[in-house]
Image: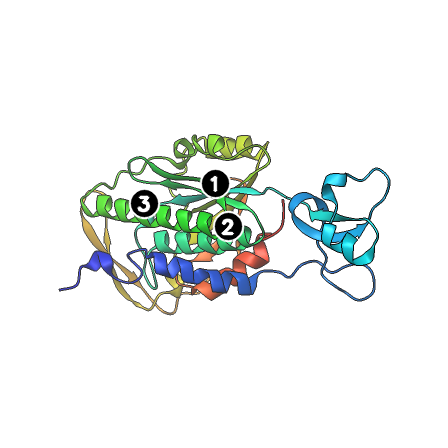
Amino acid sequence: MTDPLLAEGVALRSDDLIAVRRIALSMSSPASLAALPGGFATKRKGRGLEVADTREYAPGDDIRHLDRGTTARTGRLHVRQFQEERDRVTLLIADFRPSMYWGLQRAFRSVVAAEALSIIGWSLVEDGGRIGLLAILPQGYESVPARGRTRGMLDVIGGMVRAHGAGLAAVATGQTEERPLDTALVSAERLVPTGGEIVIASGFDTVGPGFSDRLIALSQRRSVKLVHVSEAEPEDLPAGQYPIRLPKGRVIRLGIGSSEARRPSARPDIDDIDGHNAVVVKASDGVEKTARKLVGSIALGRPA
């Protein structure tokens, strides 16, 4: 008999999060076009390590940047120009508290949160950013320091898979106590430098009385973005009787009829979380639909 904790949509697998890279990059916005006629994508020149171009030497140029090959070919002094380094550090915060380990259709909300953060992470490392992780567990944390390139994203994926497995095992053994999200975010500030970014993927259950103040404090020196992982509305579910287990173990059945009218939302993709806007991602949506929504709502692959 197959272990239900290993079922698709319940367990988090590194292969699935690595495969998200292709979808994330296909959704990323192209480079900005030059203002001059021709519309060629351009790179910003500066003092980085990657060579962007060469040009003739001008008085005052650093002779350490002389390009010997071009100088030898042309007979005139040439210097290298380097592409500017834009160090973008982003902390991905995955909410793996007990309330995230449930779902009605495609996958647990915890799995969808990891997918959403992987979409964002792959887009950012492709643009040269560095990615770190803070996974909030029923008891404790899992953190991964910020690193760049594919190696950094693979470290983050490994951290999410380990944390998700530990959280799922804890919930399966009855650890369902939910600590407030505001207290769990206390350690976020020390994990991302001033000027960095924080992306929180959560269901935002039990946020705590100090949640809004915590976000305001973090936003003073960092850019904070929220991804609200939601489940289907009752009106979206097929008609029937649904068993609901209450916190003390009592089970009730909730009847849902197909004729119930759903009240339309003026901004269905944006939610208000304690006075802060959050991009809404539905757990029932596929990865590609989630990627389109995130790319359209969050400035992926671009400096803040």
Residue for point 29% across, 63% down = 8
Q: Could you tell me if the residues under marks 1 and 2 are in contact, i.e. CB atoms within 8 Å?
A: no
Of 40 and 245, nearer the camera is 40
Q: Quadrant of the C terminus?
A: top right
Q: Residues within 10 Å of mark 3 (few under 14, many from 20)?
A: many
Residue for point 50% across, 53% down = 120
The amino acid sitting under disc 2 is Arg
Residue 246 spot, x, y in % from top left = 23, 47
Q: Which residue is mark 2?
A: 149
The amino acid sitting under disc 1 is Ala
Residue 289 spot, x, y in % from top left = 48, 65
4 up-or-down from 65: above or below: below
Looking at the rendered structure, the secondary structure element under dot 1 is: strand
Q: Which residue is mark 1?
A: 146
The picture quadrant where one finds residue 41 is bottom right
Residue for point 80% across, 67% down = 38
User: Distance of mark 1 from mark 2, alpha carbons?
Assistant: 10 Å
Q: Which mark is residue 163?
A: 3
Of 90 and 186, nearer the camera is 90
